[in-house]
Image: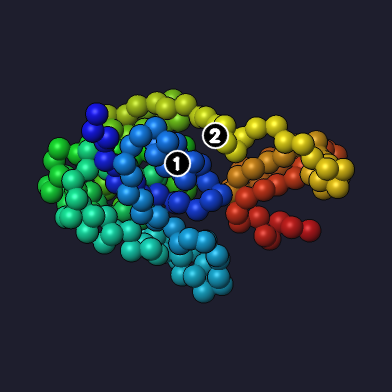
Amino acid sequence: MISKKILFAGDLNEYGRTLQRYRTLEDSGFVLEGISTVPIPWRPTIDSNLIEKITWKFKIPIDTTGANKKIRKAVENKKFDIVWIEKGITIRPKTLNFIKKNQPQAKLISVSEDDMYGRHNRSLYYDWGLKYYDIVFTTKTYNLEELKLLGGKRTELFLDAYDENIHHPMALSEEEKKRFKCDVSCIGAFEEDRAMRVLDLAERGIKIVVWGNGWGSWVG
């Protein structure tokens, strides 16, 4: 049996589930070519954060890894059965159109666990590019119809999952137990609504440990 070939673009840093999905596809027998849409390793700097915040405010985020150019080059040189884009807020509509014109046989899919109808998660590139995807996958049932309003032709639900190679019970030392002991663990990037909910719990005397990007100004 000939293995399906997938061009996979997304945040391929070790911290996220995107890389876990990439590795699971490889383990399942697919042949993958990966393009990271986020620098590896990701390291925030004052200058890049300022520029990125400004461009993000106008919903035109910077393609910091040259992913659009890399995708077009890959599509020119190789044939793929699937082009898999994770979130894709920096992927230009013209890149998606280039894929459709040059490889009409390939299924172009969008995958995200985030609420992509929420304006804080979207970019103009994402909005303008939705019409090019053959399938838009989401973990949010309410997004199934909402994303069609933005131009998605077909939406499908996929469920949250875990990676058995990473998510499993671990034996902790006494020192680790003291370090990680808490009433609630919150894992996720900073969002104002999320932060206010965490703060409300903390003010009620609940010990919370927060893991994720963007919480620096909240560290006491």
Query: Percent x, y for residue 91?
Result: 31, 53
The quadrant of the rendering that contains the C terminus is bottom right
Quarter-of-image position of residue 157: top left
As drawn, the residue found furthest toward the bottom would be 47
- The disc placed on residue 23 is 1
Residue ID at (23%, 33%): 2
Q: Would residue 50 appear left or right of 129 to someone viewing this image?
A: right
Q: Would residue 73 appear left or right of 63 to someone viewing this image?
A: left
Residue ID at (79%, 40%): 172
Is residue 112 visible in the rendered image? The answer is no
In the image, residue 210 above or below residue 147: below
The quadrant of the rendering that contains the N terminus is top left
Q: Which residue is mark 2?
A: 163
Query: Percent x, y for residue 163?
Result: 54, 34
Query: Element at badge 1?
Result: helix
Q: Would residue 200 appear left or right of 64 to someone viewing this image?
A: right
Q: Are marks 2 and 1 in contact (CB under 8 Å)?
A: yes
Query: Element at badge 2?
Result: loop
Q: Amino acid type of disc 1?
A: Arg
Q: Would residue 110 appear left or right of 104 to someone viewing this image?
A: right
In the image, residue 56 above or below residue 171: below
Query: Percent x, y for residue 74?
Result: 23, 55
How packed mark 2 is, by other alpha carbons closer than 10 Å (few <14, some 14-19, many 20 or more), is few
Q: Amino acid type of disc 2?
A: Asp
Residue in the foreground of this view, choosing between 210 and 36: 36
Residue ID at (57%, 32%): 164
In the image, residue 116 above or below residue 49: above
How packed mark 1 is, by other alpha carbons closer than 10 Å (few <14, some 14-19, many 20 or more), is some
